[in-house]
Image (cartoon, helix red, strand yellow):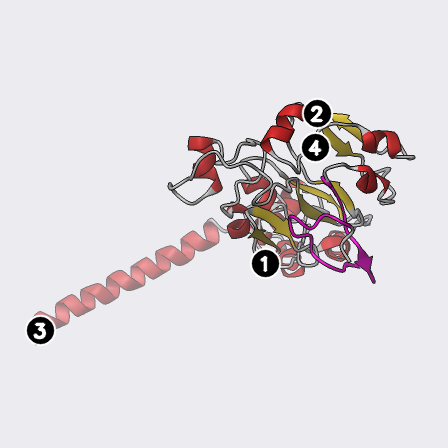
Amino acid sequence: MSSYLFPILLVTVIGIIAGIMLTIAAKVMYVPVDERVEELTDALPGANCGGCGFAGCSDYAGAIVNDGADLTACAVGGPACAAELGRIMGVEVSASEPEVAIVKCCGYNGKTNKILEYKGVQTCKANKSIYSGDGACMHGCIGLGDCVRACKFNAIGVINGVAWVDRNNCTGCGACVKTCPNDIIELIPKHSTVYVACSSIEKGAQTRKQCTAGCIACRKCEKTCKFDSIHVVDNRAVIDYDTCKNCGMCVKVCPDQTIIKLARAKGKVKKNVVPGQNKAEA
């Protein structure tokens, strides 16, 4: 009996000593945590999407308290969240313009010439690293859905070989922007309903050979705009969203329907833009 008792007592004593040591260490090494970090974390949406530039909501909250991070960096929470963060930090925050993602490509199946059949790892990144895409246009959507997998809000999909955005679900977190290897996804102000769905920087003749829906830099849009809001830069039309009035005149004169205008009703897009349907969607 005594042969069993001694090991039990020994383990118990060791446990007690270890407990005392851990208690002392916890008090000696205790680092005070600002209560505002927890408040800020609770005020954030909890998406942990990384759109703010930090690992997650709690990391962002810590950066606000410890490093003075921007209070308007959470695109998911939007202006209301920024205002609440400001209240917790005791500062006034001005509302920022919500953003939404657009895909600068309308070279859906049948519009862009295919030059090979890719059989490798089915990701845009892998395709880009080996073949620079399987289409004749090296600047278009590869269509293997890296952006879809990156989005946590079911706001982006691939239809007819091209990514499209559900603007009513998009939070503007930017995850799709960061993951696209061709850099064809961009965040624009949510109030904007006109955008250029092309990323090609080739000359017009070359673009026309590669894709019948590409921008050929004809400058008709530039000449038509009464607000000086669209210009051809590097062989493609670029919109200045700060001055654009969403009038849609550029859409009407674009010979290849490369410029898209969304119809809106009660503050929401009435119908999602699906590549290949490039008239004022209604």
Q: Is residue 225 left or right of residue 24?
A: right
Secondary structure of residue under mark 3: helix
Q: CA distance from mark 1 to mark 4?
A: 29 Å
Q: Identify the residue under disc 2.
A: 235
- The residue furthest bottom is 1
Question: Disc 1 marks which amino acid?
Answer: Asn
Question: Disc 4 marks which amino acid?
Answer: Cys
Instruction: Report if residue 202 is visible in the image.
Output: no
Mark 2 surroundings within 10 Å by alpha-carbon count, few (fewer than 14), some (14 through 19), many (20 or more): some
Residue 222 spot, x, y in % from top left: 83, 30
Magenta-drawn stretch contains 100: no
Circle nearer the N terminus (2, 4): 4
Tell me where the magenta segment starts and ends, as one range. Answer: 257-279
Q: CA distance from mark 4 to mark 3?
A: 90 Å
Secondary structure of residue under mark 1: loop
Q: Nearer the viewer, mark 3 or mark 1?
A: 1
Question: Cβ–Cβ below 8 Å for labels 2 and 4?
Answer: yes
Question: Disc 3 marks which amino acid?
Answer: Ser
Circle nearer the N terminus (4, 3): 3
Specify the quadrant of the image occupied by residue 266.
Answer: bottom right
Q: Identify the residue under disc 3.
A: 2
Q: CA distance from mark 2 to mark 1?
A: 33 Å
- The residue furthest right is 226
